[in-house]
Amino acid sequence: MNITNRLFTYPVLSDEKDDYKESFFSVDYEQSMQGVNSLRLSFDITMNCHELEQLIIDGKADYVIHLECSTTAYREVLHSVSKHIEHVIPIGRINGSFDVVAFIILKKNITGFFCTDWVDDFQDTTFNLFTGSILAYQNLNSLDVTKDYEEFTNAGSIFAVYKRITEDNCPAEINLESNKIRIGLGTKDYDVYAVYSGKTELQSLFHSMLILPVLVYVFEELRQEGGEETYHNKEWFLALEKSYAKRGITFMEEVLNPEKTSYQLAQEAMELPLSKAFDQIPIFFDTTEEDS
């Protein structure tokens, strides 16, 4: 929601406008990962207009940060009276590019507003402004959050699911010696998997049934003495290492984190697949039907 070519009927403080002589409104921000599944944003606002600052002190205006991701329809508005704002976004709510705009916005109607730093065209004018009026703004550079969670959830990426020729039901097996993490299913199980694994509404259920326990096993193996040395040249290991690096995290440091279990690491790596699987279960039942 960037502000572009917008006309205002009153002076607005922005580096894209010339309504003020010396005043400025500037916002710097940084982004960093907080763990595996959260993005931390930090905003620092610089503003030197006395009249606008007084409105904030008096509780008549706020600093506002507007966040919007068109890809996921995520939208959030942060209000603050502080010039330093921090906010954490679950990484699952955003993907690709998302826009950030900083504002000063009125919280209450005001009458006869005047600023001594307005350009000459407004020097003899006062304005009656209404709640929600934009007093200042800055379009910030778009953030780009490209996630590569397919490494953890796509059987065609670092995972290979294959059929074992068996007569009866049997346990699945895991093989880490190949360049892909190989998951062997018995004949009966594989035949069901082959038919239904491509259905969108079943993806989270399959991920929780197959990929999640396999990742738990992978992390447990890597935590063993010599685990990294054993597997560090495998393509699946390098893919995981690269994916974590894109999020600013050292893969093996995260794997060896004593405060996290392998089960927790696997869930975080897959962006909480159990919750997604539980969300899908009601799809297969008529929840409006009363118990008989």
Image (cartoon, helix red, strand yellow):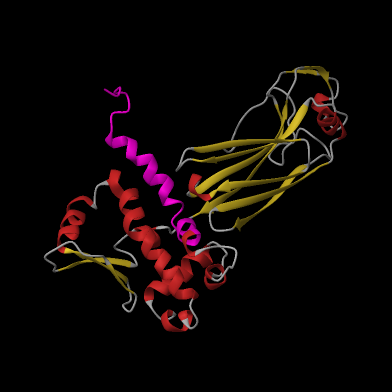
Residue in the image at 33% along x and 79% along y: 177
Q: Is residue 289 magenta?
A: yes
* Closer-to-camera residue (96/148): 148
Q: Using residue 220 as the reference point, say whether residue 139 is left or right of it.
A: right
For residue 239, above or below residue 10: below
Residue in the image at 36% along x and 58% along y: 153
Which secondary structure dominates the residues rendered in magenta? helix
* Closer-to-camera residue (219/55): 219
Which image quarter: residue 159? bottom left
Quarter of the image with the N terminus in it = top right
Residue in the image at 58% along x and 58% along y: 35
Q: Using residue 175 as the reference point, say whether residue 85 is left or right of it.
A: right
Q: Is residue 185 magenta?
A: no
Q: Is residue 118 visible?
A: no
For residue 194, above or below residue 230: above
Which image quarter: residue 194? bottom left
Q: Using residue 259 as the reference point, say whether residue 172 is left or right of it.
A: left
For residue 186, above or below residue 105: below
Which residue of the protein is positioned furthest toward the front in this rendering?
292
Magenta residues? 264-292
* Closer-to-camera residue (23/98): 98
Q: Position of residue 28 (x, y in %)?
A: 71, 50
Q: Is residue 214 visible?
A: yes
Which image quarter: residue 11? top right
Which residue of the protein is positioned furthest toward the left in this rendering?
167
